[in-house]
Amino acid sequence: MRVLLVEDDLRVSAGLASALRRRGHDVVQAVTAAEAVEADPVDLILLDMNLPDRDGLEVCRRIRQHDEGVAIIAVTARAEEHDRVAGLRAGADDYVVKPFSMVELQARIEAVMRRTNRTARAASALQVGALRIDVDARRVWEGDREVGLSRKEFDLLVALARQAGTVVPRDRLQLEVWQTTWATRHNLDVHVAALRGKLDDAAMVETVRGVGYRLRCG
């Protein structure tokens, strides 16, 4: 998904852009309102409400006037209710108050894209090394052998396969598989161990200590 990140704090912008790219998004950055308004079309805009050259509410209105289809999430330190209401009335689809976690932001992004039907249909077939995954049929093959997985094991494998070769944080996996970040650490570890036990190449699922898991590409 192509994301326009409008943030004038370069340190914050760099960190957020890096985190979004790790999650597979194509990120374009802007530091002023003028750059934001003139940017090429994107799927989603993360819009800081405190910009140096123009108020974020005005920027939001202008973008919405020119593009009714783009998803907009206001990202700001303005936490009062009247600020949130003003942002939504200006055309934002959601409103995230700083500081926030990447897990919360990603969940809000997914919710906005689902609500507005702006997200592209996820691939229904995945190939990672010897693994072939039919997402719609919920079936997995390793070479010529079909692998029987439980519902959560399958969801876990798909979450890893969609970002194969990159580390998927534990909280991200918990959010995708259990729809919550409150799932216990033991619960995720047990399912990873069970998944490994059903694969001929158990080492495909790698542990990255202190971060999460990675599905090796080859």
Image (cartoon, rainbow, N blue to C red):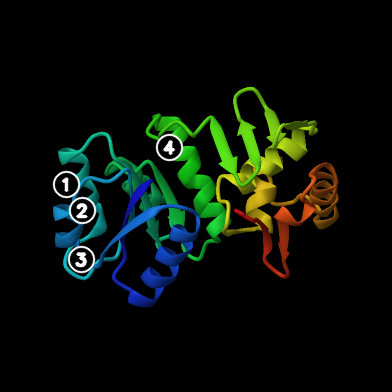
* Callout 1 amino acid: Arg
Q: Are marks 1 and 2 in contact (CB under 8 Å)?
A: yes
Q: Position of residue 15 (x, y in %)?
A: 44, 71
Distance from the alpha carbon under mark 1 to that under mark 2: 5 Å
Q: Position of residue 70 (x, y in %)?
A: 29, 40
Q: Secondary structure at mark 2?
A: helix
Q: Which secondary structure, mark 1?
A: helix
User: Contact, CB < 8 Å: mark 1 with mark 4?
Assistant: no
In this view, the residue farthest toward the bottom is 11
Q: State yes or no: discs 3 and 1 in contact (Cβ < 8 Å).
A: no
Three-letter amino acid code of the residue under disc 4: Met
Q: Which mark is residue 59?
A: 2
Q: Nearer the viewer, mark 1 or mark 4?
A: 4
Identified at 50% across, 66% down, the residue is 99
Q: Quadrant of the N terminus?
A: top left
Helix, strand or loop for disc 3: loop
* Crowding near the residue tagged with mark 1, few <14, some 14–19, many ≥20 C-alpha atoms within 10 Å: some
Name the foreground residue: 180 vs 83: 180
In the figure, 207 relative to 162: above or below?
below
Q: CA distance from mark 4 to mark 2?
A: 21 Å
Disc 2 to disc 3: CB gap under 8 Å: no
Amino acid type at circle 3 is Thr
* Residue that carries the numbered disc 3 in the rendered image: 32
Q: Residue at x 29, y 65 (%)?
A: 50
Q: Earlier in the sequence, mark 2 or mark 3?
A: 3
First in residue order: circle 3 vs circle 1? 3
Alpha-carbon distance for marks 1 and 4? Answer: 21 Å
The residue mark sitting in front, 2 or 3, is 3
Across and down, in percent, residue 209 comes to 73, 69
